[in-house]
Amino acid sequence: MENQNQDVKFGFNEFAEVWNGRLAMLGFVIGLATEYITGSGILSQIGLQ
């Protein structure tokens, strides 16, 4: 018996894309804040520069 009323919450769908965008924006803001607080860029923090 399949439940036809539930939306799929995995794969390429609107739910996944909205959360992907939200988490990308959060990561970007955290990266900018880390650069501002430490005074050095992300690449230099992980030893690539």
Image: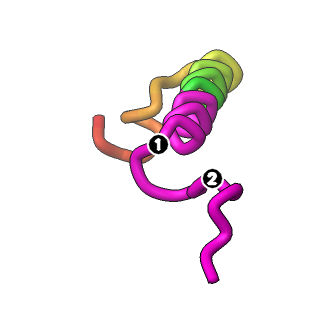
* Amino acid type of the residue tagged 1 in the rendering: Asn
Q: Is residue 26 magenta?
A: no
Residue situated in front as seen by the camera: 24 or 39: 24
Compute the Cα span from label 2 to label 1: 10 Å
Residue at the bottom extreme?
Answer: 1
Q: How many marks?
A: 2
Q: Quadrant of the N terminus?
A: bottom right
Determine which residue is flagged by label 1.
Answer: 13
The residue lying at 46 percent from left, 25 percent from top is 41
Crowding around mark 1 (Cα neighbors within 10 Å: few <14, some 14 to 19, many 20+) is: few
- Residue 47's disc number: none
Question: Which image quarter: residue 33?
Answer: top right
Tell me what residue is drawn at x 43 percent, y 55 percent.
11
Residue at numbered disc 2: 7
Relative side of 33 to 10, left or right: right
Left or right: 41, with 28 as reference point: left
Q: Secondary structure at mark 1?
A: loop
Magenta residues span: 1-24
Q: Residue furthest left?
A: 49
